[in-house]
């Protein structure tokens, strides 16, 4: 039987509240979000007037259920992962990617495989550089040219510990890098799920001030096609929606701001503008940020965004949709960077946005 290997949970501090710390520690590749679901259940359900789950794995928390308009806040709880697809005769595990991996990042990583007996530690391997020809050294290995080594000596031994279909995540957890800047495996998008849940928690004591029904949804399977948000947009049937995700901080070397715009870590939430974004929501978000003197930034996206916002906008007969992103460096790597002040500012912005909504404001234009 595999020995239990618990995820290290970072100590809660004013910068890292328990809710966020536990989400960052949870292992939740798309389609296997159970650990993150349990964290959301623990911290958000007690604050909600109604709390539901669905067949895709979404968590749906409702506050002020008789309110109008209906506002849906969405942050996805899934992350990148690997899925075991084949075990060879010597006990090495081959895998497919869950979500959009940069293959150059995969080799030489410690990973945790989630199994029915508990977590199993493994290492991603490939042929060493010393054993390559010059031409091979210049290539990025294909997935089938890499494997996971769990120290097994045979296929039988390996399959006694893991099963085909088990999922794996990179081992690194959260650490503070410097000041309020943290590094974690899956800021994308545990910070978004934290934000929407925390907004509902902070609104709960003020529910009598709300005109709106506020529905915070921790969405599943965003990384493989915004699937949870698609279902939630239909079932919740909101008038208004805001997706909360991470966005690229473009303030690092080798990033052409002429192509990707100018956004900085620590510069505040990024408010998106473009065809995916309803102008009422954009204008109101900006007004809230200005009224509260919250530092904020802008992103222009001329197409459906690569976030839950694109599914929310097209729900049922159409939903007035916005997108707020938390600046992040090194997206889809084992070491993503976020400034925790940006996370807190995003919570404050959306609390003000929800409280400011008036009856009948449905975002039609």
Image (cartoon, rainbow, N blue to C red):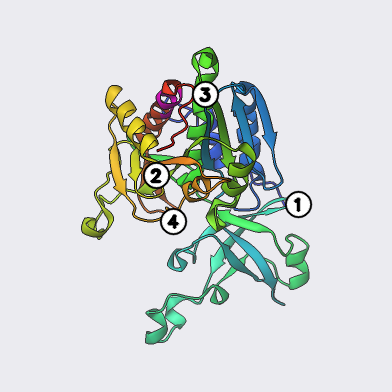
In the image, 304: left or right of 316? left
Q: Position of residue 101 (x, y in %)?
A: 48, 62
Is disc 2 placed on a helix, strand or loop?
Answer: loop
**Toward which corner of the image does residue 302 lie, by quadrant?**
bottom left
Which dot, 4 or 2, sits closer to the camera?
2
Mark 3 vs mark 4, CA separation in Å:
38 Å
Asked if residue 155 lies left or right of residue 258, the reply is: right
Residue 256 found in image quarter = bottom left
**Which numbered disc flags the more N-terminal residue, 3 or 1?**
1
Q: Nearer the viewer, residue 118 or 34?
A: 34
Residue where numbered disc 3 is placed: 212
Q: CA distance from mark 2 to mark 3?
A: 20 Å
Give the residue at mark 1: 116
- Provide the residue designation for mark 2: 277
Query: In the image, 151: left or right of 241?
Result: right
Give the answer, above or below, for where 203 lies relative to 98.
above
What are the residue bounds of the magenta stretch? 350-354
Q: Residues within 10 Å of mark 3 (few under 14, many from 20)?
A: many
- Element at badge 3? loop
| Residue annotated with mark 4 | 333
Marks 2 and 3, the one that precedes in the sequence: 3
Real-space CA distance between mark 4 and mark 2, rounded to the nearest whole angstrom: 28 Å
| Residue 206 visible in the picture | yes
Q: Are marks 3 and 1 in contact (CB under 8 Å)?
A: no
| Total labels drawn | 4
The mark that comes first in sequence, 1 or 4, is 1
Query: Which is in the foreground here, disc 3 or disc 4?
Result: 3
How far separated are the C-alphas under marks 3 and 1? 42 Å
Question: Chief secondary structure of the magenta span?
Answer: helix
How many angstroms separate mark 2 from mark 1 (CA)?
A: 42 Å
Q: Is residue 365 above or below residue 4?
A: above
């Amino acid at each position: 039987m595999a020995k239990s290997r618990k995820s290290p949970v970072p100590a809660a501090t004013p910068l890292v509240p328990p809710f966020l710390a536990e989400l960052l520690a949870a292992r939740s590749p798309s389609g296997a979000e159970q650990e993150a679901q349990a964290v959301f259940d623990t911290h958000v359900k007690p604050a909600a007037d109604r709390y539901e789950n669905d067949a895709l794995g979404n968590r749906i928390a409702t506050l002020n259920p008789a309110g109008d308009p209906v506002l849906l806040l969405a942050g996805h709880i899934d992350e990148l992962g690997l899925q075991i697809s084949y075990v060879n005769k010597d006990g090495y595990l081959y895998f497919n990617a869950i979500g959009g991996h940069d293959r150059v990042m995969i080799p030489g990583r410690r990973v945790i495989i989630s199994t029915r007996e508990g977590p199993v530690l493994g290492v991603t391997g490939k042929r060493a550089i010393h054993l390559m020809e010059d031409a091979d050294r210049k290539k990025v290995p294909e997935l089938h040219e890499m494997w996971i080594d769990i120290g097994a000596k045979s296929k039988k031994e390996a399959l006694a510990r893991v099963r085909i279909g088990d999922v794996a995540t990179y081992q690194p957890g959260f650490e503070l890098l410097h000041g309020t800047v943290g590094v974690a495996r899956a800021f994308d998008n545990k910070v978004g799920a934290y934000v929407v849940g925390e907004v509902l928690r902070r609104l709960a004591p003020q529910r009598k001030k709300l005109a709106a029904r506020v529905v915070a949804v921790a969405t599943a399977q965003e990384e493989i096609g915004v699937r949870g948000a698609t279902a939630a947009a239909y079932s919740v049937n909101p008038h208004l929606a805001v997706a909360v995700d991470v966005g690229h901080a473009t303030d690092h070397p080798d990033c052409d701001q002429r192509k990707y715009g100018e956004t900085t870590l620590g510069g505040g939430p990024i408010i998106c503008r473009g065809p995916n974004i309803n102008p009422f929501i954009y204008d109101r978000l900006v007004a809230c940020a200005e009224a509260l003197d919250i530092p904020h930034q802008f992103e222009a996206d001329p197409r459906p965004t690569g976030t839950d916002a694109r599914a929310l906008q097209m729900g049922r007969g159409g939903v007035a949709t916005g997108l707020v992103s938390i600046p992040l460096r090194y997206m889809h790597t084992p070491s993503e960077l976020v400034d925790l002040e940006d996370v807190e500012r995003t919570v404050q912005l959306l609390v003000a946005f929800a409280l400011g909504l008036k009856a009948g404001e449905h975002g039609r234009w």
